[in-house]
Image: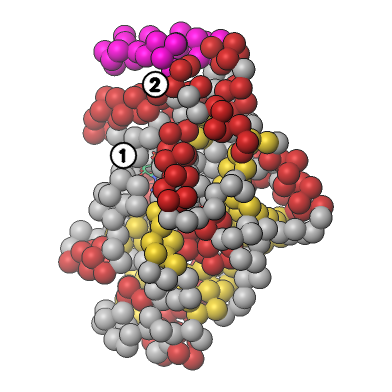
Amino acid sequence: MPAIVIVGAQWGDEGKGKATDHLGSRVDYVVKFNGGNNAGHTVVIGDEKYALHLLPSGILTPGCTPVIGNGVVVDLEVLFREIDGLEARGTDTSRLKVSSNAHVIADYNRTLDKVAERFLGSRKIGTTGRGIGPTYADKMNRIGIRIQDLFDEKILTQKVEGALELKGQVLTKVYNRRAPSVDQTVEELLAHADRLAPYVCDTTLLLGQALDRGETVLLEAGQATLLDVDHGTYPFVTSSSATAGGACTGSGIPPTRIDQVIAIVKAYTTRVGEGPFPTELHDESGDFLRNTGFEFGTTTGRPRRCGWYDAVIARYAARVNGVTDFVLTKLDVLTGLEEIPVCVAYDVDGERYEEMPANQSAFHHAVPIYEYFPGWSEDISGARTLEDLPANARAYVEALEGMSGARMSVVGVGPEREQAVVLHPLR
Ligand code: GDP
Ligand code: IMO
Ligand code: MG
């Protein structure tokens, strides 16, 4: 009756979608517990490539029930566009369940996300502009709109009135924008209510009962450890709890039922948006990683910032998430490099840091201390066992395992489902 958590160890886009899909056929439920359509997960199955944003990656596995948990913020238009897109390609989405306690992204919050970024100027976060931050702020401010509110027009109208009383003023008086009317917003939200109704339920009860029956639940994070609002590089983070703790609050599954935490970590590092990134490369090595790894955002298409593997960050992710297994992805992208630098510690103003500096300014000034590993030139995309990997690739994986704080259980060698070397089966 285990619950398993999958999190990102770095700044997102580590390949969580592929890992979830990989486990999909061996689990009964896949739950998205945080974030919204700021996420972008690419899953490749044979010749078909899927880009998922709001739907849990388990949607692609027949027999697996995908769940949007209470910790998620839902853009209803995006939800149905994604459902329609998958149905048109022959994917059955009828098993989807949506928490009645999940919050809804209203039109004014999409607008506020974009205008706030412009207002911040050089201090901007580089958000995805999907209304994620303002919607979570409303949740904490207790003026949010929840899925269940859509089924009672009177309550919905009262809640939208309450929210717009404040947010309308902010839009017009601070940002000089037109605020939507209450009726307009209510109408937009109600437009989806009938279609949404059959999917909505108490997902905490559903999942609790599933665990009681001995079924397996996989909790899939959006974003990643260093984008977590508590444990990430604040304020350059997303507004939700993307670490393993968030899996409990965002799903209603208690910590005592979780017995495995899998962190996905790329064989190098990427980041989208603003904020500190010690191993970032501004030279042709960075271009090599971006072009070879195809590091362009699934959600916004932005080129991702690229850098070498950072073991300090991996150790931090292992610690705050209680990682039991790492899945190391995109090892194939490093093929052809003569030597591969790995950041083993930081130099901050002459002082050596083995762990993440607790102070934001220190992290901003962190200069990576590198160790260098010999590269390989053999094509590894067909490797399926450790023995199939060239000695230098094996040594690289073993070295990362030694410095990252948990075992490397799977190594990704290509985007397709089967392109992986399994060292310790995850299930
Ligand atoms: P997510 O947000 O963590 O789900 O990751 P994304 O889907 O945004 O980005 C990861 C990208 O890497 C996707 O395009 C995947 O198809 C691809 N990918 C995942 N694992 C591997 C791997 O082992 N090798 C290669 N070459 N690509 C991979
Ligand atoms: P997946 O799930 C990478 C980044 C944005 C921005 C910051 C805040 O695909 O790994 P937000 O719109 O969430 O308020 O933006 O977080 N960000 C991501 N970066 N992958 C993601 O998701 C991200 N989701 C948000 O670029 O810097
Ligand atoms: Mg992504």
Can you tell me which quadrant of the image ligand 2 is in? top left
Q: Which residue corresponds to the image point at 41% horizontal and 90% vertical from the top-left?
A: 391
Q: Is residue 167 visible?
A: no
Q: Residues within 10 Å of mark 2 (few under 14, many from 20)?
A: many
- Spatial separation of the CA atoms under disc 1 and disc 2: 19 Å
For disc 2, the marked residue is: 108
Q: Nearer the viewer, residue 98 or 10?
A: 98
Q: Is residue 209 visible?
A: yes
Viewer-nearest of labels 1 and 2?
A: 2
Q: Which residue corresponds to the image point at 51% horizontal and 35% vertical from the top-left?
A: 73
| In-image side of 184 versus 7 (left or right) | left
For disc 1, the marked residue is: 126
Q: Amino acid at mark 1?
A: Gly
| In-image side of 46 versus 221 (left or right) | left
Q: Percent position (x, y) of residue 103?
A: 55, 30
Q: Is the stretch drawn in magenta largely helix, strand or loop?
A: helix
Callout 2 secondary element: helix
Residues rendered magenta in the picture: 158-185
In the rendered structure, find residue 257 and report the number of the disc placed on it: none
Q: Amino acid at mark 2?
A: Tyr
Residue behind label 1 places its C-beta within 8 angstroms of ligand 2: yes
Q: Nearer the viewer, residue 235 or 16?
A: 16
Q: Residues within 10 Å of mark 1 (few under 14, many from 20)?
A: some
**Given the current orientation, which residue lies at the most extreme right position?**
212
Q: Percent position (x, y) of residue 322?
A: 62, 58
> Is 290 situated above or below 362?
below
